[in-house]
Amino acid sequence: MSPPVAGEKRPALVTCTAPVNIAVVKYWGKRDEKLILPINSSLSVTLHQDQLKTTTTAAFSRDFVEDCLWLNGEPADIGHPRLQSCLREIRRLARKRHGESSGGDEGDPLPLSYKVHIASENNFPTAAGLASSAAGYACLVYTLARLYGVEGDLSEIARQGSGSACRSMFGGFVQWVMGDDADGKDSVAQQVAPETHWPELRVLILVVSAEKKVVGSTAGMQTSVKTSRLLKHRAEAVVPERMVQMIHHIQQRDFEAFGQLTMKDSNQFHATCLDTFPPIFYLSDTSKQVIALVHRFNAHHGKTKVAYTFDAGPNAVLFLLDETLEEFVEVVKRSFPPKSNGDQFLKGLSVKAASPSEELLAEVVRDPIPGAVRYLLITKPGPGPSVVDDGSCHLLGEDGMPGSSS
Amino acid sequence: MSPPVAGEKRPALVTCTAPVNIAVVKYWGKRDEKLILPINSSLSVTLHQDQLKTTTTAAFSRDFVEDCLWLNGEPADIGHPRLQSCLREIRRLARKRHGESSGGDEGDPLPLSYKVHIASENNFPTAAGLASSAAGYACLVYTLARLYGVEGDLSEIARQGSGSACRSMFGGFVQWVMGDDADGKDSVAQQVAPETHWPELRVLILVVSAEKKVVGSTAGMQTSVKTSRLLKHRAEAVVPERMVQMIHHIQQRDFEAFGQLTMKDSNQFHATCLDTFPPIFYLSDTSKQVIALVHRFNAHHGKTKVAYTFDAGPNAVLFLLDETLEEFVEVVKRSFPPKSNGDQFLKGLSVKAASPSEELLAEVVRDPIPGAVRYLLITKPGPGPSVVDDGSCHLLGEDGMPGSSS
């Protein structure tokens, strides 16, 4: 895509989608709050957009009076500092490219001074606690870059919206290299392996029933960095070697090692939250029961067939191979029987019904808790952001206003 | 007391009591399983025996056919390796002293070859999860030492029964110095300050309603030492400086600093349990609610008026000053309303009813959970083990059998 130079046909309106990602080596703590530079590198799996994605349409026009934002159909504050950071950085890159391509002293500067309209929505409820800000900022930056004809590594800009958003700029397995530079230029995301690298890998999200509001991750990280000695040690001494190990396990498609390290890193992240003062608890009783269930299931099989990870909330994200999916889904259904309220319990990729052995069920399923898990979402690793060509998917109409396409 | 040399009048039966202690710098992890040598020093407050104590009667007689043990009135296994360690060490010291006092070549060796009867009971339910093994082994070692006329530092022997038992050999504020020696001779308890040092200090134990069985501390420690990187760092880098700080805060009677460090160390201990693989959870939802309540209460007052600590179970042990007791007990009663099942809710030291301000209650008491706390036990720092002279307290009768005194 070309930069928006004078006289060239260019999109005045672009729609893109971007994915959610789930970290298997966790990011927790910033060394620079403004630039969003982390105290350690992290690594995530990008989830498939068929199940979880953000869609964003951005448009500019000489007729727009002011910059505007709509989130999930509702007007929202475009003045948010992090959103402004992303907008400013994209416009700065566009100006730079524009200056270069036009010889630096001519061309049409107008589109850069036009106001922009942005509409964004998720195909999943925000309340599900599935890190929508990562997909949201990744999609915003990717869409704006397309609109303004900016190319190259955009992860550094997405990072300034939401740290983990930089990892949603790629598909498959992605590391966020913490970097050394004070200006954050080397704190960027890199793909470790594409989504096609491990075709058997599946991801199962257990959305647990709503619990009380917890400490937000921005505030939580700040308190942890200030007060947790264990977090400091984790960032300095533990994560560097875990990054090397995790990349190796992924390259080898070694589920046993990948799963073990994923669980250990999730536990250690939550341990540093508990070492924070006042302590932060993200794991609910249901989370703990899922953890115990996974350990019993693996113990029964004598190897790691399922691995859990938890972000700053009680929902469990489980990794497993396709061959384990049917059996484990049945175990989850027996352990957390769905409440018969008419809602769908299994969402996402389809899964055949299984009949686990009585021996397995007797050993693994204990004290079922009806209703503790609201629903299961089955997905897998997926690609990074992409442009949507289908005009019917635009979230803004010809007039640059939302509503006309929905 | 003299050693049991020939012809001297000596007790063939001794009864002693010993206290429970609660650590404020936690012990978790052994560097030597057999000798029970810890990976870090620890520090505790000895609780008053008026509320929590173990009573033990030990007797020897040429008529006893075999060593026997009764726990809370029931026959128990005296062959337990740790109990045997204590018995063997006491007898070894007695033999040594006996040899010395009799010139090494004469005297009456008979009592040392006599069989021993031991009966022990707690004045609190074992099920309450109040670290009865510390009081139990401290009492056993102290009683046997009196019976055999052994004096000197017995904490090294008590340590071989249960690590934390060595701290129950003294009253007041007690540190267990981890030591360096491979044979454990320098891994002993020392009094930091007597129980009279801080007369305003009170201890409030919230016994929470029975939850599921948790991982025992012996097994838990082993897994933590093997798997937790954070525990290793805590033991090596964090605890040494916390020991110095905690001793200083106690010497200064600085409740603010003492309370903060107590809470942080409890949280860090539980963080290392979560960093263990598979993870160990000792804090229940009720524990977390007590933690949140304490932080709200302190925030309301703008200073640390109450501090929590939790051992390997969900019961909360709270420290506070006498001046705060009435108000906080009322806050606990409102937050965890007792179930009206006729059981006593307030036990131990008496406390007057208070009427906290509506403002305090509105800010601090949230979503009361009836029945989550079974009862409150109010106590304070207390003295170490002592001999009971009142013959009616013996747990063994003239015939060396239990039952006659109860």
Image: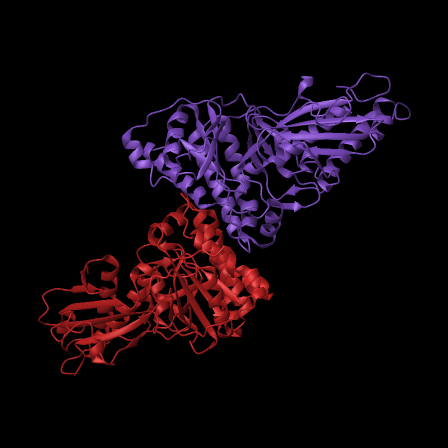
Chain colours: A purple, B red
The quarter of the picture where residue A159 lies is top right
Decide: is B66 above or below A131: below
**Does residue B110 show up?**
yes
- What residue is shown at x 61% (from left), y 44% (from top)? A39
Q: Position of residue A392 (x, y in %)?
A: 67, 18
Left or right of residue A63: residue B295: left
Q: Position of residue B312 (x, y in %)?
A: 39, 55
- What residue is shown at x 60% (from left), y 35% (from top)? A132
- The N terminus of chain A lies in which quarter of the figure? top right
Q: State how many labels appear.
A: 0
- What residue is shown at x 33% (from left), y 66% (from top)? B156
Compare residues B360 and A326 and report the one nearer the observer: B360
Decide: is A54 above or below B200: above
Decide: is A245 above or below B351: above
**Does residue B161 show up?**
no
Compare residues A393 and A385 and report the one nearer the observer: A393
Q: Position of residue B162 (x, y in %)?
A: 32, 61
Left or right of residue A153: residue A246: left
Decide: is A231 above or below A329: below
- The C terminus of chain A lies in which quarter of the figure? top right
Q: Which residue ends up furthest to the right in the rendered image?
A: A105
Compare residues B24 and A205 and report the one nearer the observer: A205
Left or right of residue B296: residue A397: right
Q: Position of residue A189 (x, y in %)?
A: 63, 32
The quarter of the picture where residue B402 lies is bottom left
- What residue is shown at x 52% (from left), y 53% (from top)? A275
The quarter of the picture where residue A218 lies is top right
